[in-house]
Image (cartoon, grey):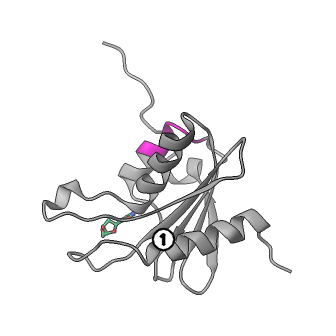
Amino acid sequence: MSQFTEQVLEAYELAKEARGKAHCPYSRFQVGAAIKFKGNDNIYRGCNVENASYGATICAERTALVSGIADQGKQIVEFVVVVTDTSPATQPCALCLQVLAEFSEPQTPIYLANKKLIESETSFGKLLPNPFTEFKV
Ligand code: THU
């Protein structure tokens, strides 16, 4: 029996599928992500979408996140799955973590996976313990 829930396994499959759609002619590094939010069963996926103006590139995690927010409005992330083809599995970049901070909790699980398996589980709070959350002027 798998150590992961049905929903995590489903999200892993969806993230792998999304990874195949990555637009990455510059880096050739395909990334897929899937995010489940609390309060509904939907799973939103994303891939990296690169641009000739490199800085305009959008990572897979942010693609998945904004897809969910655009569909259902503000929600809290239940878990994130990220799929690359590396071992150890790649973790979300700091920019994606900062964007996730707006919708995540320290204990939010982040599953790091490659094409073969979900290799490890970490949490939002472990990857970004001190996000920037507010400012005063
Ligand atoms: N990338 C992601 O999609 N997610 C990350 O967390 C790290 C990096 C993408 C951006 C770019 O298209 C490629 O991977 C190489 O940096």
* Picture quadrant of ligand 1: bottom left
Indicate the position of residue 27 as horizontal and vertical percent values: 25, 76
| Position of residue 79 in the picture relative to residue 47 (left or right) | right
> Which image quadrant for residue 30?
bottom left
Residue underneath mark 1: 18
Indicate the position of residue 116 as horizontal and vertical percent values: 59, 87
Q: Nearer the viewer, residue 137 or 27?
A: 27
Residue sticking out furthest to the bottom = 116
Q: Per the image, is 101 magenta?
A: yes
Q: Per the image, is 97 magenta?
A: no
Q: Which residues are magenta?
A: 99-104
| Position of residue 37 in the picture relative to residue 99 (left or right) | right
Q: Is residue 86 above or below residue 47?
A: below
**Residue flagged by tag 1: what amino acid is it?**
Ala
Total marks placed: 1
Indicate the position of residue 127 as horizontal and vertical percent values: 51, 54
Task: Say few, some or many: other residues with alpha carbon within 10 Å of mark 1 (under 14 / 14 to 19 / 20 or more).
Answer: many
Residue sticking out furthest to the right = 1
Q: Is residue 55 above or below residue 112?
A: above
Q: Please, what secondary structure does the residue beneath circle 1 have?
A: helix
Residue sitting at x 54%, y 35%? 73
Residue sticking out furthest to the left = 53
Residue sitting at x 45%, y 57%? 61
Residue sticking out furthest to the front = 71
The quarter in which the N terminus is drawn is: bottom right
Q: Nearer the viewer, residue 88 or 80?
A: 80
Q: Is residue 90 above or below residue 66?
A: below
Indicate the position of residue 134 as horizontal and vertical percent values: 42, 24
Residue sitting at x 28%, y 80%? 28
Residue sitting at x 37%, y 21%? 135
Q: Is residue 72 above or below residue 54?
A: above
Q: Nearer the viewer, residue 51 or 103?
A: 51
